[in-house]
Amino acid sequence: MQSVTTAPDFSRLDPTSVRVLAHPLRSRLLATLRLHGPATATDLARELGTNSGATSYHLRKLAEVDLVVDTGEGDARRRVWAAATDSAQVVASDFDEDEDAATAMGWLERDWLRHFTEKFGRWLDVRADWPRRWHRGTGMNDYLLVVTAEQLDEMHAEIETVIDRYRRSGAGNPEAKRVAAYVSFYPVDMDQPPRR
């Protein structure tokens, strides 16, 4: 498999795509294509410890909702698949009226949480091997904010603008490394929901 992602920008998950993506193998297929770049079903099966029949089936399902694409570089028997985009944008309110999609999104967010815990834990294990200049910008921060729902939306939009500005700013620089950025907000006083 290649080690560079070629997908552009991001996709916004809708109720249909989130229901399709909320599957253990499909989630990992998409994550692997985003991380390592285009691959065949056989390559992905080897990487994920499954069989190529299963990966082929689930890749076609992901393609039906435009999360992966056939690059056209393979042949009828060895299709080369790529992630359609390099990240996903989720707006939880998109699923308010669709209980199945909301349930699927809940599963997917928990899957992302497990993935984050695994990957960030790995970073903590290897961080000492990296140059100190990488220690300043990486890591985890914990901020306590007091905001309205509207202010939280505004802050989220501002953070997305900053992330978009830096999305490919280091491209072509041999010192640049790919960095995963997770943005999550949750109320601290969970047992005290605001009045509607």
Image (cartoon, helix red, strand yellow):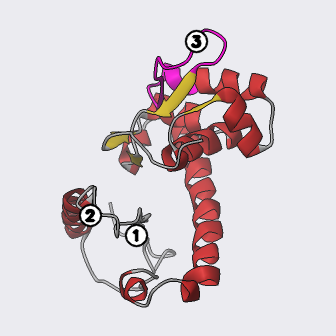
Q: Nearer the viewer, residue 11 or 90?
A: 11
Q: CA distance from mark 3 to mark 2?
A: 43 Å
* Element type where label 2 sits in the image: helix
Q: Could you say whether the residue bearing mark 3 is in a helix, strand or loop?
A: loop
Q: From the top left corner, tell me how far across and down residue 18 is, in percent.
A: 51, 37
Residue at mark 2 to residue at mark 1: CA–CA distance: 9 Å
Badge 3: residue crowd in 10 Å (few <14, some 14–19, many ≥20): few
**Label 1 crowd (10 A; few <14 / some 14-19 / many >=20):** few
- Whether residue 77 is in magenta: the answer is yes
Give residue 90's position: percent from left, percent from top: 39, 48
Nearest the eye: 96 or 16 = 16
Tell me if label 2 and label 1 are in contact, CB under 8 Å: yes
Counting residues from the N terminus, which is met first, the one under dot 3 or under dot 2? 3
Residue 167: % across, % down: 28, 57
Numbered range of the magenta stretch: 61-79
Point 41% across, 33% down: residue: 84
The residue wearing badge 1 is 185
Residue 3 is inside the magenta segment: no
Mark 3 lies on residue: 75
Is 129 left or right of 155, judged from the image as shown?
A: right
Q: Is residue 133 above or below residue 96?
A: below
One can see residue 100 in this view: no
Name the residue at 68% across, 37% down. Answer: 44
Residue type (three-letter) at the residue carrying disc 1: Phe
Q: Quadrant of the C terminus?
A: bottom left
Q: Which residue is mark 2?
A: 156
Which tag is nearer the camera, tag 3 or tag 2?
3
Compare marks 2 and 1 and give the one earlier in the sequence: 2
